[in-house]
Image (cartoon, rainbow, N blue to C red):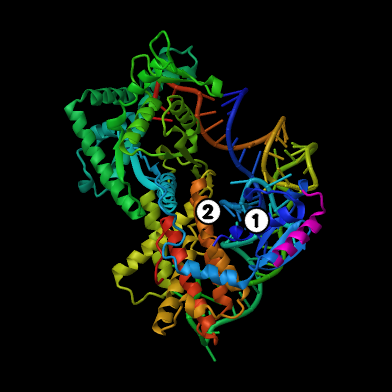
Amino acid sequence: MNIALLLIPTISKCFEEKFNIQLLDSEITFQTTRKEFEGDVTLVIFPFLKKVQEKPEVLAQTIGEYLVQHNPQVAKFNVVKGFLNISLSQAVWMETLTQIANDPNYGLFAANGQKVMVEYSSPNTNKPLHLGHMRNIFLGYSVANILKANGYDVMKVNLVNDRGIHICKSMLAYQKFGNGETPQSSGMKGDHLVGHYYVVFDRENKQATAQLLEEYKAAYPNEDPEKLAEKAAKNSPLLLEAQEMLRQWEEGNPEIVQLWQTMNGWVYEGFDVTYQKMGVDFDKTYYESNTYLLGKAVVEEGLAKGLFFKKEDGSVWVDLTADGLDQKLLLRSDGTSVYITQDLGTADMKYADFPMQKSVYVVGNEQDYHFKVLKLILQKLGRSYADGVYHLSYGMVELPGGKMKSREGTVVDADDLIDEMVKIARERTKELGKIDDFESAEAEALYHALAMGALKYYLLRVDPKKKMLFNPEESIDFQGDTGVYIQYTHAKIAAILRRAQASGIDASPAAFAAAPVLAPQEVELIQTLAAYPKRIADAAKEYAPSLIAAYAYELAKTYSRFYAELSIFNEADEALKSLRVALSAQTAKVLKAALQLIGIQAPERM
RNA sequence: GACCUCAUAGCUCAACCGGAUAGAGCAACUGCCUUCUAAGCAGUAGGUUGCAGGUUCGACUCCUGCUGGGGUCACCA
């Protein structure tokens, strides 16, 4: 039930009758009353003072009195300065709870006929996934869920960067130093094995570069050392070999292509294991090896339309200075494409596959500029989906020492972190000894659910746009504002519901309708439950799973207070007992649904 | 250098897009398990919201300047 809709008509009428003023519905907004004041919702009076020449207290008093007289759902009111605090009648809350209980899909919106594509993960195939990828992946997966809940037809895609100089580096190092080892022979996960050779390349390349630099210094003692270093880096024999390898790959050299397929295959096997552990999936996977030539036709189109221009050397550019951006290269002078060329082509290809109104790209904020440009060009080209392009730009996950760098070994590896979290969950659960009767497979599944709950909540509770800090010294918490706390609250309620069912307690609206005056804890719980649909809508509008995470915590916290302060099974009044069981059932339902939106499981026992 | 972005309790994060006395968790301290799961509940302490101005009934929120982090400005992806 929407509280605002309950009150707006009466307030509009009040303004009409008392002041002869027509207000738009959108001008009347409410906020929930702060808990230090009495009331349920608050109308801020100040914005109306421009239209009504009156003291705020007087106007608030007038509206309050009118509401009590003309709207039976308003029980009473009080005025504090320019704030009108409105208390709704108990019937409103009883009706609200009844509606929630009668709706098995509570919080979900009906299909809206719109399609949206969400691209996330998009890994390189030269190294395993790390904590930064995890933030990306959980964000993308969760946003997809949230959009589905809002009625969108969602397609989740992964665009794998499987080609380029980086993978050639791993391939070259493997060719030189790998001795034909495989994931099987080495016992290493495929993505880690390939990542290992990427590091080997970097190490060897550094050595070779340093050696070359010494030679240069000896040969040109009068040159600026910085310039020589630059030259050495460019001419390092290993790098040149890697570049040559890329050329041969593009020409289709069978030996190179074979190696590329083999090593990428290892990586995909490794990624699949990690994705599965993370509990995420995709509806479709694109590979850059198939898309990297796309986009040239788009460039031709832009030239023909006069949107782009060609320089003397044959390179193609777009001038975005009028939009406050720069000139941007779209095609090299040798006719080959650059990053944005591919992205233009890929955008069209995606639309051909799935004609969507919105297209979400979950990509780090270091690409803010790139996506501004991409969207602008698509708009200039008149693409129907261009306005729906949204770059879900998220901040980096930093370590106390600064940014994570794969090559310097300061990354937090995804597989390692998951294993570590599972280990902690196992130890902690065993200490508590509440599930000693579980089969071992059942117990392991729970440890995993708790580990992922802690991890996902940790990464998703922060506003996506902001950078966040991860301190490996302090393990991710299982207490307080955490995923595990919410899971625990759910498990606690599940126990209540099992007992209620065993005792044959009827928790239907008919059974609790006759409940006497509700306690504040009960009203607060109903209010929190009632806020759920709006939170889902807000989360979609902002592309922010953090709003769902915060809501789930708030609901769990509210229930925990209710649970600690009111007894359920010792309640003498049968209707009240039914009501409390119903409140528990609805809280469990909503908690489970909210957790599902952020990809977290809700255990029945823990 | 130009542009983008961030700065809130000791630490990690909130604050419903301008509303009331800026809230949680962690860490510290104090209570509460012979009654429904204590991975919990209640409480104490902790703040000049980086600094200086401005806008207004009202500013963590908007504007200007400054300081300090991060990022982007490649014929890399």
Kindly indicate the quadrant of the structure image that contains residue A161: top left
* Stretch in magenta: A52-69
The spot of residue A510 in percent (x, y) is: 48, 78
At horizontal 40% and vertical 16% (from top left) the residue drawn is A303
Location of the N terminus of chain A (image quadrant):
bottom right
Residue A547, which numbered label? 2
Mark 1: give few (<14), some (14-19) or many (20+) Cα within 10 Å. some
The disc, 1 or 2, on the residue closer to the chain's N-terminal end is 1
The chain carrying label 2 is A
Pick whichever, A191 or A64, lies toward us: A64
Residue sitting at x 56%, y 73%: A562
The image shows residue A10 at horizontal and vertical percentages of 66, 59
Looking at this view, is B16 or A463 the one in front?
B16
Kind of residue sitting beneath label 1: Phe
Tell me, yes or no, whether the highlighted magenta stretch contains residue A56.
Answer: yes
Q: Helix, strand, or loop for circle 2?
A: helix
Mark 1, residue position: A30
Secondary structure at numbered mark 1 = strand
The answer to whether residue A52 is above or below residue B30 is above
Q: Is residue A234 visible?
A: yes
Quadrant occupied by the C terminus of chain A: bottom left
State the predominant SS element of the stretch in magenta: helix
